Image: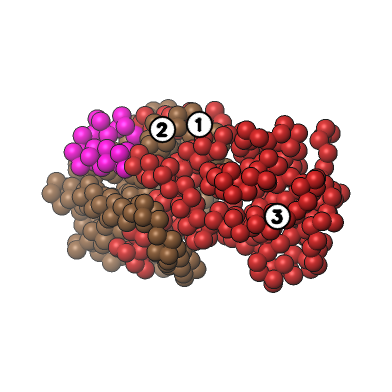
Chain colours: A brown, B red
Amino acid sequence: MSITKEFSNVLIIGLGLIGGSIAKKLKNNSFNGEVHGIDNDSKVLSIAKENNLISNQTLNLDNLEDLLVVFCTPVLSIKAALSSFLSLDPSKEIIFTDTLSTKGLIYEVLQKEYKELKDKFVLSHPIAGSEKSGLMHSKHDLFEGRVSIISPHDTNQEDDIARIAEFWNSLGSRVKILSQSEHDFIFARTSHLPHVISYSLAESLFKNLKEKTFEYSGGSLEDYTRIASSDPTMWKDIFVSNRSNIISSIEEFEISLTNLKQLIQEGNEEEMISFLREIKRIRDISISDK
Amino acid sequence: MSITKEFSNVLIIGLGLIGGSIAKKLKNNSFNGEVHGIDNDSKVLSIAKENNLISNQTLNLDNLEDLLVVFCTPVLSIKAALSSFLSLDPSKEIIFTDTLSTKGLIYEVLQKEYKELKDKFVLSHPIAGSEKSGLMHSKHDLFEGRVSIISPHDTNQEDDIARIAEFWNSLGSRVKILSQSEHDFIFARTSHLPHVISYSLAESLFKNLKEKTFEYSGGSLEDYTRIASSDPTMWKDIFVSNRSNIISSIEEFEISLTNLKQLIQEGNEEEMISFLREIKRIRDISISDK
């Protein structure tokens, strides 16, 4: 049993893969409160309504008590999405969270331009997704067994953090805490860099092999370039909002790549095999420790 | 019904992941002939015998009529493996093939040092594998639905090529023809380069994130670094034997990486999104065309 109180209302801003999956899981959980949604695309909104994922026809925020607002927009759309909440009654019982893939920019926006919302905004990032975007690809079990990061800041309250943690738990994920700067440093390396690599590999292969790129491959190349089919707006926003961490991560990777390239160029078999063995050893240990 | 004749005897040299999977599939197919095996590791040989994957206790090649020999060794072990076949009666009905991941080196070895075996040697490469190596990870359906490349050369006979094609078909794979030089050019890019990248990415992450590398990842980083757990000897041999193609493929990739890095550095959102959209467009088309 949870000791924190379930929200009476959840409002999802952006009914794409992530927002749609939250709505589906809440429905699947037979969530006691009401789920509302906002999306720029009126067709998406109608589909969500028709499928009973959201209850609203129109939306009057003032009528929604004990409200959780979850921003599921691309990173650079957050400013515009936040602006509609400025006129809210400050005494209203409301907590904000988000699912944005970078945390530095949204924190800066809150700190500089939306200070009145900042205290009640608990930054989150569920580590779940797919190269397939949009409501049609959303699914109730997207967060099952995944990690959700919460990045509390100096003016968040313990109770609010606990309720957000409970919210992510209720969607099936395990919560881990990271500061926003740790989050952006780590995910530049574990997620943004692999995307940069996948886009670059795909470009390089299409340029040099053209229609032969996938003709002879056994399936693993499809997997390896899968994330190059991700949503372009989402990833453009991530690259813009976490630029300096991503540039550093690329530079670190270039050092390792140059090193291995040189081992191959020199053809020193002994050094090469100890390099490959060492990588395998660390990876096998790291994976089995998980 | 096949129009080519099934072999009466199959001898598998090297009972690792690939050789073991061939043996298991032949057993699974209730192959009419006999399956024999050779492995440097006597324990592996005993296990294969105990599991009725091979029939031989000892091996006398002279007694084996209508024999197919399949070399499933690491690339650089091929010379030593070939040497034991030099003393065979040249009138013997025997065809050779292999499963080596690069084709240039083995062709050169045949051409320069084993000319007496070359005519009857049809080069092959089943595009199947795993980061898990050894007989214990082999499985009868490893080749199911996969592509097997055959690289015929100038002194191969049509009948021999047809029998080898039929052999790979009987293991569940579809045969495609590529010259050895095309093979090594293409697989440098679609397979060897992704391995170079995966090893480099893994090294770079372990160096910069240490034990945090997989702590917050949602599963796709495990997939993305999976091939860095591949067999070190196998990959050292591939890097050595296909060096110049691999170096070129790394250089092509570096151009694409530098290009995307610069787009991120400059933060030009319009150029960035058209780059990402174009890659996604081509990849989505290529995959759906497959």
Q: Residue, x 69% and y 72% (percent of image)?
A: B43
- Name the mark on residue A208: 2
Compute the Cα span from label 3 to label 1: 36 Å
B274 left or right, relative to A129: left
Chain for numbered disc 3: B
The disc at residue A133 is: none
Q: Main secondary structure of the magenta part?
A: helix
Which is more toward the observer, A47 or A75? A75
Q: Which residue is mark 3?
A: B85
Kind of residue at badge 1: Lys
Sort mark 3 into few (<14), some (14-19) or many (20+) by Cα contacts within 10 Å: some
Task: Answer few, some or many: residues within 10 Å of disc 1's Cα (few below 14, many 20 plus, some between 14 and 19).
Answer: some
Residue B255 at x, y percent in the picture: 30, 39
Residue B74 shown in magenta: no
Q: Give the extent of the magenta segment.
A: B253-276
Q: Badge 1 sits on which subunit?
A: A
Q: Is residue A34 visible?
A: no
Q: Which residue is mark 1?
A: A212
A134 vs B32, nearest the viewer: B32
Q: Marks 2/3: CA distance?
A: 40 Å
**Observer-nearest residue: B251 or A219?**
B251
Judged by depth in the image, the label closer to the viewer, 3 or 1, is 3
